[in-house]
Image (cartoon, coloured by chain):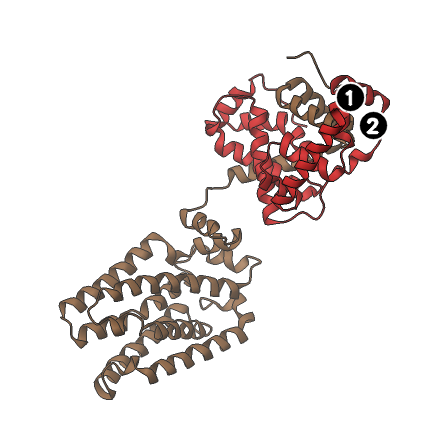
Chain colours: A brown, B red
Amino acid sequence: MTGWHVADDTMIGYARGRVPLSLGASVETHLLACAECRDLLRAVVAGGEVDRLERLWDEVVARVDAPRPRPLERLLRLAGVSEDTARLLAATPTLGASWLAAMSAALGFAVFAALAAGANDRGTLLFLTVAPILPVLGVAAAFHRGVDPTYEIALAAPYSAFRLLLLRSAAVAAVTCTAAVVAGLLLPDRSLTAAAWLLPALALTLLTLVVARRVDVVYAAAGVVAVWVPTVVLSHLNVGRFAAFGPAAQLICLAVAAVSLVVLVAGRDRYATTLGGV
Amino acid sequence: MFDHRDGRADAELLAATGDGDRTALEALYVRHAPWLLVRLSRRCADRTIVDEVVQDTFVEVWRGARRWSGRGEVGAWIWGIGVHRLLDRLRRRPPALLIVGEHDELVASAEEEVLLAVQFGDLGRALDRLSPELRAVVQATVLDGLTAREAGRLLGIPAGTVKTRMMRARAVLREELS
């Protein structure tokens, strides 16, 4: 273009990082505009770095071919979650749209029923009973082999199954609980519905995970729910109004959650194979 | 390495890349990856980071080919992506080692001296006589067109230091050239 071109020796020196700043800057500026000198540099570089450039190209192809991450995964990446963790969380089946829709429907039903029953105890009790069950079902479905499309991949992956368990459970619990908090605020008796079910939810979820070490996670969840619902109803009728959510009950829930967590952490090595009731 | 030769101009290749033509991206890679690799290596001594940045850049070219305005050199556009990807990587993982003109201490060959004198005259010599610290700042801000903040990230020094060094470099150059 300008008739000025980089001399062979200079180009070799430049490629090896052996030219002074001013000359290097001149070469770099020229390279942007001159295809001829880029070819010369490529010939000079190709001598030493062919393998490196080919390897980099292979990786570019691999990344270009990789499917675009789902919106949830991109969101998690933006929030600073590492790439592998974001992928695993995004693959959690119960964080998918269909599950979220089902959960919203269940919550909506509970809120509707509570409102329809008027501002009385029965409606509030219904909500308080249902809200802690949601994360239990969510976590159960997140690990059931019939539901989780990555079930077998997760078994074979060199990734701590325990870490995956906690990550997914926390993510599912966070999503379901957020939804339940919003729903709880819609109800008349907010003093209880706003937060009283949170500790029970935590306790039930952790308890489910503990039981799931012995039996299929779905049975574990069903069992926990089967104990939870009568406990709430009977204590409400026999012990006192909303007894299952009173101070004493909250302490019990805290204790159950703490013990479950200890048991989970103590047995974390077992999760390599036993999750989902293999 | 890659054996094919593509007769299309860079701008056409970039347009084709925007339409999802993989061979166009490959042709761009063949033409532009070598100099990008060398140019990045002059600014970052960590080979792993340079490798990642070259990959990042071409993945970005693939995804963002449609964003090219169509004005100016394709090479300059690619470099713009590359240098900012380098800054991104350095922000996440500070480099173990930085080139602060370390190779520039080597004595230039007689031929280069002549070339320099012809091409750059006093300015080139004055630039090369700057201390490595000042030279690195001049390179990052004047030649690479980075802001003081970006240059600071590249060199691992505060933005304020970039500004004071740039002022000192200007003073030295003015004195040398007067």
Query: Dot 2: few (<14), some (14–19), or many (≥20) neighbours within 10 Å?
Result: some
**Label 2 chain ID:** B
Q: Which mark is residue B77?
A: none
Q: Are marks 1 and 2 on the same chain?
A: yes
Closest to the observer: A2 or A61?
A2
Mark 1: which amino acid? Answer: Leu
Q: Which mark is residue B116?
A: 1
**Label 1 chain ID:** B
Quarter of the image containing the N terminus of chain A?
top right
Residue A88 against residue B12 in the figure, above or below: below
The percent coordinates of residue A217 (x first, y second) are 41, 69
Mark 2: which amino acid? Answer: Ala
Q: In screen coordinates, is A92 left or right of A57?
A: left
Residue drawn at the location 60% of the way across and 44% of the way down: B89
User: Does the rendering let one see residue B20?
Assistant: no
Closest to the observer: B60 or B80?
B80
